Amino acid sequence: MATARLDYVAPWWTYWLHNFPHFNFPFQSVDNSFKPEEASYQQSLVFLACVGAVGLGLSLLLLAVYLVCLCCCCKDIDEDSKRPDTSCVTWAAVITGLLICSAVGVGFYGNSETNDGVYQLTYSLYDANHTLGGINNVVSGSLGAVETGLKQHLERLDEIFAARADYLQALRFMQLMVNNVIRELTALPDINKANVDLAAIADQTAFVEYYRWLTYLLLLILDLVICLAMCLGMAKQSRWLIITIMAFVVLSLILSWASLGAGTATAVGTSDFCVSPDKFIVNQTKDFITADVAHYYLFCSPNLQNPFQKSLTTCQRSLTTMQIQIQGLLQFSVPFFPTAERDLLGIQRLLNSTEFSVHQLTALLDCRGLHKDYLDALMGVCYDGVEGLLYLSLFSLLAACALSAMLCAIFRVWTLMGSRDKEYDDIDEEDPFNPQARRMSYNPRRSNVHSFCSYTSSMGSQASLQPPPQSTSNAAPPPEYMNQSMLFGGRPQYENVPLIGRGSPPPSYSPSMRTTYLSMTDAQIRHFGTDFQV
């Protein structure tokens, strides 16, 4: 029926997603109508989900190209400071961290919106299931009361009134009314199948939604932890921490692209349903309800006649007629047949309860209750649900791009750490101003050897020392300056800050100190051993 829908209008983003190209694996165009039972439509959604796999492949390819270029190209080193330029890496890490934090915020909002939409859908399904269950209970209870209770009372009254033809005629007329009520109640649609389907759909949807929400929540937390660990790893420059971060970044990158593909396929499929939900529901319910009944509840327009009105009116009139007949029999037959009073009162009670059930059934079969549940379900799925999926897809895309950039920054940090280690490896271990060499030259077993300064203090002032006569031996000329370990007794607490990398000249010594060193006799050398030999 071409009835205008004024109460539900599909949002613009559902039409945008609905117009996405639908292709199956032989790359043939597929109708974008929502037909989940068809294999071609299922393949089109799987084809859309493969977008995530394509994005993952491109990301890994770009990362491989960047890694090859990073290994082959020369490192940019500042000639003045002899240190690599780290400002680019720092800014790249900051930008990727901010981008991931922004993506996580978008993801939290999208996850909440999707969860709200699915919760509204399941709530509406459960409420509609409760309504349909109430209809089924009222119909089955009324049928049971009419078929068993009324017929038993009428059979006993038929035996009691066997001698009165006029009373028997009234009983035949009441039996005709009972048959009318049974026929009209039986003509109502079979609600059992719809009731079971709605309950199963609601339970399955709630189960899937819980694990979907939990999976996205863990992925969001993982991205935040990666950002914090990245900051810590760059600050400490720890190799094992960088390797751990790299492994988790690759894992999160794979999950982000996978969630993008799954979210895109789900959003497109849901949008296909939201664009034309009535057509799909009519096709799904055609086996147990007629099209006019489906349209009555889907549209609930004042111009549409209630398809159950005729049956309900017939039941109501039949029950009213039976009430009149029972009142007459109670008034005229009981004085002559006292034993009939019990059955007549039993029939009256059953008629009252059945009439109440018919009124209750009329209210339950009204379209406004089920139509409201239907609209709430559509609003939850097509507005909050699809909107949340779009935000989750945006989160997955931003996170995937940011994680790819973070991997590039991690590779660069790794090369900078390698260049720093190589710089330390290039330092001459025999350099007297190398702190590592000074630490290696320190021997605890010689910590009790007197220093040169203590020796000179015991001998008096430096001016009292007279230089000995020059030896004629072919001794090597003394070095131009003294080793720090020789001057300070090899103790690291007396060592100065290393001068490597500061452009400072070697330390200079006074002439008196040089003269004192040159004036050492052989006995003094034997006393101090080789501690002061250069």
Image: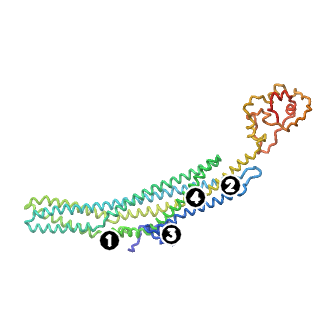
Expressed as whole percent of the image width and height from the top left, the position of residue 81 reads 75, 49
Q: Count residues near mark 2 (Cα–Cα under 10 Å), then give few for <14, some for 14-19, many for 20+.
A: few
Expressed as whole percent of the image width and height from the top left, the position of residue 181 reads 22, 67
Q: Are marks 3 and 4 in contact (CB under 8 Å)?
A: no
Residue at screen point 31% across, 70% down: 307
The reply, left or right, for residue 340 in relation to residue 376 is: left
Look at discs 2 and 1 and give the one toward the viewer.
Answer: 2
Q: Give the residue pinned by disc 2.
A: 88
Q: Give the residue pinned by disc 1.
A: 305
Expressed as whole percent of the image width and height from the top left, the position of residue 156 reads 13, 62
Residue type marked 4: Ala
Going from N to C along the chain, the mark reached first, 4 or 2, is 2
Could you say which disc has been placed on residue 400 in the image? 4
Look at discs 4 and 1 and give the one toward the viewer.
Answer: 4
Residue type marked 1: Gln
The reply, left or right, for residue 356 in relation to residue 1 is: left
Q: Are marks 3 and 1 in contact (CB under 8 Å)?
A: no
Q: Give the residue pinned by disc 3.
A: 24
The reply, left or right, for residue 70 in relation to residue 181 is: right
Residue at screen point 65% across, 60% down: 65
Going from N to C along the chain, the mark reached first, 3 or 2, is 3
Residue type marked 3: Asn
